[in-house]
Amino acid sequence: MYESTERHSGGKFTQHFCNSRRLKDMPSYDSSRGRFRLADRHVAVLAHLLDKETPPAELAHSLTELQQIGLVGPQGELSPLLRELLTVLARPVVVVQAETMGLHGSLSHGIVVGRDAVFSHDGWPGEEESEYVPIEPQTLVWEMARKVKLRRREADLENGDGVSEIRTTMGTLDAVLSVLGEASDDITARQAALRALGEVKDDLREPELSAFADLVLSLDSTWRMTAAWAGQPGVDSVRSIAVWDCGSYGYWLRAEPPEPVQEGQVTADSTLRLVRSSAGEIWDRLADLLPDKEDFADESA
């Protein structure tokens, strides 16, 4: 989808980002804190074993790794240490996913809410494994905010010439991104961005035009947070928001394309609308992603 072109490098977004992965030799766990470092392939092995299935041949090495650290026995027995984690993963009530794009490319983080426990997991640049850690349910919104580095700060209102909303197109964003990789410094990058904006057929005018260029140049990261659950019949069970973290220019909610965005839904002609927001407003929106009791198909959930 188009938003995957929001890529960050050296304080500016370019069309290239790091895809390299430094694979760790082994999964690991810390019994004192009930935390685990597992790759998706390890989780897949555990899912097969939990269902009393033999993992396929392509997961044989991953199975061996789990056996070597004692999380799986020689006959496929699952360690009691995994009981709480696997119960949550097998029967989730709410699944929260955070997709972030920053200096090191894209990362995926998440939270899985079970009936009796909650596990948070974080990715790390260049590593295959994510760390799964149990958290208290009361800290759920705090954990969501931590995953996207949400923090209270006063944005410089002079930045952006007081602009509070920008409406353009995804094609215009791509036009700006396409020229930034050749810039040698921030000054030439801004000149290139403004030149690219002047060449596209767009209704963007000053002061929004310059503000848009400055937002793209100041991007620390972009992120999307999604919450999903089994809802009432006929009721949408997915909620999502997308945000640009623009450093001293503050937070900007990506109001359009509206979330959740489906694969293939966004084109170059799709409207891109950014609305200046605050950390407090975004905190409230994160909390609103989570379902209330009446949102569940089974109200006993």
Image: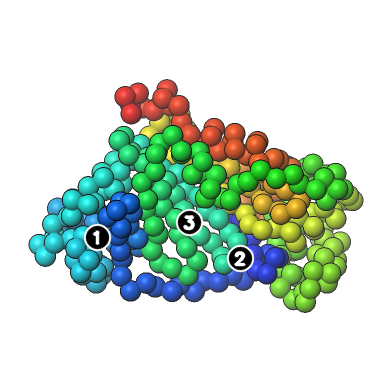
Labelled disc at residue 103:
2
Amino acid, disc 3 = Ser
70 relative to 169 in the view: left or right: left
275 relative to 26 in the view: left or right: right
Q: Please tell me how crowded label 3 is: few (under 14), some (14-19), or many (20+) other residues with Cα within 10 Å.
A: some
The foreground one among 19 and 158 is 158
Q: Please tell me how crowded label 2 is: few (under 14), some (14-19), or many (20+) other residues with Cα within 10 Å.
A: some
- Residue 216 appears in view: no
- State whether residue 232 is above or below residue 203: above
Residue that label 1 marks: 45
Residue that label 3 marks: 108
Residue at image location 52% in from the left, 53% down from the top: 99
Q: CA distance from mark 3 to mark 2?
A: 14 Å
**x%, y% of residue 63?**
22, 66
| Residue with the most extreme front position | 32
Amino acid, disc 1 = Val
Precedes in sequence: disc 1 or disc 3? 1
Q: Secondary structure at mark 3?
A: strand
Q: CA distance from mark 1 to mark 3?
A: 20 Å
